[in-house]
């Protein structure tokens, strides 16, 4: 009996020792496995399924910046209201709202009986001017030889000068109808004239339709050229000393905080705005696109100095407990997890300090990073 107990105790001790020894193996294996699972490979189909996207590491100034609000504005010379000096019936409309038009492009044609009379008067004046010029020259030569009376010469001169005035006035009126007076002939008289675009841009509004009467001095078309959009930033009195021409700006529109644009201050008003202790700083947008529209409110960051650090979109950072990671592209289908320390965050970007070097040429996963982390932690047994 005693012998059996001894055998039993020895067996228990052996099992306990073996069990204690085996506890170290999973931990060591886990550490080794963690190193193996710092990279993950995906097929093209898997990348498409999770919507994986990569982007570049950017140097941004997220600390030494001045925050300012502003509004997208269009200079007056880049917007136009098209109207007529005389009215008429709309015969045709050749453009649609939203369409881009070149300067001088025909927008519509207008029918007007007064226009016919104007052309007739001009051609008659041109004919009369030719005759009166000849008569004036003839009387001038006769006057030199004292053949004709002074009174006759003076009348010929007055008639000629009067018709010159009338001719020039009629020619200027024709230019208001976009008619080349020099090419006008009796055969080319028309009852319609063209309405043309005074500037290049997009048609914002059309307030006429075919058959309607286009009233004089009433807006028919509204044209805007958004290529020349700029920012009006409100700078309060306490911050005026911090801004100057040439400063770089990063800004987002109020509806798309992830769309970051660049601009440069080109002028600063020299007086306070009415009703507030603030001036307006004007900035030229460097990358105007169709998402930016006049009147849109924006949030801007003005670089106070040139210090910058590595930054990435917030969506590129994933967390596992208290640790933060990014995934960098090793090749087109393989991605490596790198631990980072986080810095300042602003305008949808976060400053990072990698525990391993990330080269400037490496791409960073900006969309789908959490899917990669999930796959790694699932395969390696790590806790999320």
Image: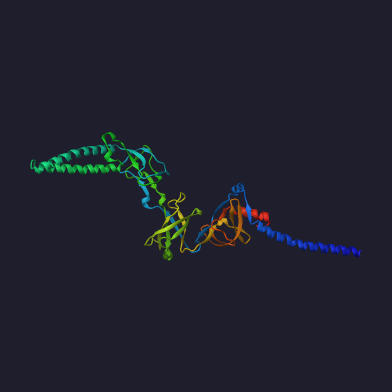
Left or right: 143 in relation to 364: left
Q: Residue 300 in the image: x percent, y percent?
A: 46, 58
The furthest residue to the right: 1
Is residue 163 positioned above or below 69 on the image?
above
Q: Residue 317 in the image: x percent, y percent?
A: 58, 57
Residue plotted at (33% across, 40% down): 194
Display colour scheme: rainbow
222 vs 185, nearest the viewer: 185
Residue plotted at (36% across, 52% down): 76
Residue plotted at (84% across, 62% down): 11
Observer able to see residue 382? no
Is residue 52 positioned above or below 23 on the image?
above
The part of the image, by quadrant, that contains residue 27 is bottom right
Residue plotted at (38% across, 50% down): 78
Position of the N terminus, as image quadrant, is bottom right
Q: Residue 306 in the image: x percent, y percent?
A: 47, 63
């Amino acid at each position: 009996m005693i012998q059996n107990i001894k055998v039993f105790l020895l067996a228990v001790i052996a099992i306990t020792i073996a069990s204690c020894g085996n506890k170290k193996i999973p931990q060591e294996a886990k550490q080794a496995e963690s190193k193996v699972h710092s990279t993950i490979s995906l097929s093209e189909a898997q990348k498409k399924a999770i919507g994986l996207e990569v982007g570049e590491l950017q140097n941004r100034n997220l600390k030494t910046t001045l925050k300012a609000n502003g509004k997208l504005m269009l200079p007056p010379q880049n917007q136009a209201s098209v109207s007529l000096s005389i009215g008429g019936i709309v015969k045709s409309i050749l453009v649609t709202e939203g369409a881009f038009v070149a300067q001088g492009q025909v927008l519509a044609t207008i029918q007007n009986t007064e226009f016919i009379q104007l052309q007739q008067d001009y051609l008659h004046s041109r004919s009369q001017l030719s005759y009166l010029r000849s008569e004036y020259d003839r009387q001038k030569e006769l006057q030199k030889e004292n053949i004709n009376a002074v009174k006759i010469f003076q009348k010929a001169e007055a008639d000629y000068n009067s018709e010159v005035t009338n001719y020039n006035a009629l020619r200027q009126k024709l230019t208001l109808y976009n008619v080349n007076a020099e090419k006008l002939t009796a055969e080319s008289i028309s009852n319609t004239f063209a309405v043309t675009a005074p500037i290049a841009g997009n048609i914002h509004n059309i307030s006429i339709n075919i058959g309607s009467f286009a009233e004089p001095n009433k807006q028919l078309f509204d044209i805007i050229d958004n290529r020349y959009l700029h920012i009006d930033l409100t700078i309060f009195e306490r911050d005026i000393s911090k801004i100057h021409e040439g400063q770089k700006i990063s800004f987002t529109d109020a509806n798309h905080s992830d769309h970051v644009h660049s601009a440069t201050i080109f002028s600063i008003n020299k007086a306070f705005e009415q009703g507030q202790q603030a001036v307006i700083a004007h900035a030229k947008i460097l990358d105007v696109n169709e998402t930016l529209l006049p009147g849109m409110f924006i949030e801007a960051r003005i670089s106070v100095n040139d210090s910058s650090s590595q930054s990435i979109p917030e969506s590129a950072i994933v967390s596992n407990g208290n640790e933060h990671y990014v995934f960098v592209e090793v090749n087109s289908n393989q991605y490596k997890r790198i631990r980072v320390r986080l810095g300042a965050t602003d305008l949808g970007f976060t400053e990072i300090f990698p525990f391993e070097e990330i080269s400037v040429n490496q791409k960073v996963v900006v969309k789908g990073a959490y899917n990669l982390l999930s796959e790694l932690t699932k395969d390696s047994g790590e806790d999320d």
